[in-house]
Amino acid sequence: MANISSGALDAIQTATIEDNQKKQKSSNDKYHFDKLKLFFGEDYYVHGIKISQPTIGDILDIGEAKFYTAISPFINNSTSIRLMLFNLGVENWCKVKDIEVYNLLSQIPEQDYSPLHLIFHDVNFLDYKIVPYTDENSEEQFGLYNPESNILLSENEYMEIAEYIRTIMNIHPKVEKAKGRTTRDWMRQEDQMNLSMKKPDDNSESNLLPIISALTNHPGFKYKLEELKQVKIYQFYDAVQRLQIYEQTHALMGGSYSGFCDTSKIDKEQFNFMREI
């Protein structure tokens, strides 16, 4: 790797992150899901494939680690697995599409993907295999094809499914792209360093437990443990964010009335705990 000053690396990192945050926002805005239907846990359909939301109890029964591992092909993108791609001989992760990431991660030997039935009740999504095809504009694309049902999902339809799963699970992988090889090398080295510093038992830690513990011990949370098992995952994360907004609003109101907070430069919408999340 070429020698670059720490200041130059900081500048590259800042510019890269800012640029890709803009790109990521525009990418996510492409898919618009009915938030009210999401909140009530209604099924969603893409090309006739029904996508359902699991409840907290469903995830508890199947096992949190097993469930998150099973959905990882839909959650990850090339940025989040760029070190893996490099080790497989892929020099530039920026050119790898999300549908290719799905194809790679969904074919890991001895991996248990059975928890996907919590999301896809009527089909085995692993029956869909990646294939090249030519679209209506005569452009080469990747799609997912099920030979048994003779159904071809376009890349856009796959992305709609992936974004829906990311939305209900409140997980949106960051997107980092780098134009030059030097920057890519630096990012991969950073990933390698972070991996080497990771504790061996980090994967055994629960993502949901700290959140559930905080919520159930908060006086404003209405669900008891047994009731929480029946809550759909999107509604659960909505409750998490709404409670955070309520506490922030309450703190702002308290600060404004006490005179310790200058509210003149604060957006008035921040005082509305019923605002859109």
Image: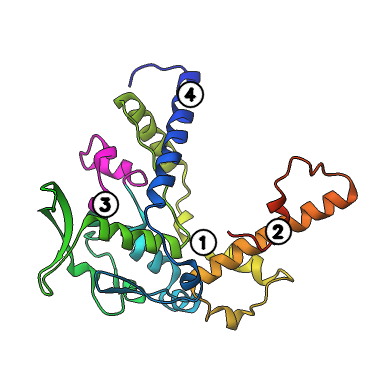
Q: Earlier in the sequence, mark 4 or mark 2?
A: 4
Disc 3 element = helix
Q: Earlier in the sequence, mark 3 or mark 2?
A: 3
- Tell me which corner region of the image, top left, top right, bottom left or bottom right, holds residue 107: bottom left
The CA span between labels 3 and 4 is: 29 Å
Q: Is residue 167 above or below residue 116?
A: above
Q: Which residue is mark 4?
A: 11
**Amino acid type, residue under disc 3 in the picture:** Val
Residue 201 visible here: no
Q: Tag 1: residue type?
A: Asn
What element does badge 4 sit on? helix
Q: Are marks 1 and 2 in contact (CB under 8 Å)?
A: no
Query: 188 or 196, which lies in front?
Result: 188
Residues in magenta, as a range: 78-100
Residue 171 picture location, percent across and down: 45, 57
For marks 1 and 2, the one nearer the N-term is 1
Q: Nearer the viewer, mark 3 or mark 1?
A: 3
- Front residue (pair 206, 58): 58
Question: Could you tell me the amino acid type at mark 2?
Answer: Asn
Residue farthest right in this picture: 258
> In the rendered view, would you say 189 is above or below 128?
above
**Residue pointed to by mark 1:** 207
Q: Are marks 4 and 1 in contact (CB under 8 Å)?
A: no
* Crowd around label 2: few <14 · some 14–19 · many ≥20 (10 Å): some
Q: Amino acid at mark 4?
A: Ala
* Disc ID at residue 272: 2
Q: Left of 252 or right of it: where is 230?
A: left
Q: From the viewer's perspective, is the residue at label 4 or at label 1 nearer? A: 4
The answer to which image quadrant residue 261 occupies is: top right
Which label number is shown at residue 101? 3
Alpha carbon of mark 3 to alpha carbon of mark 1: how far? 23 Å
| Residue at image point 70% right, 58% down | 272
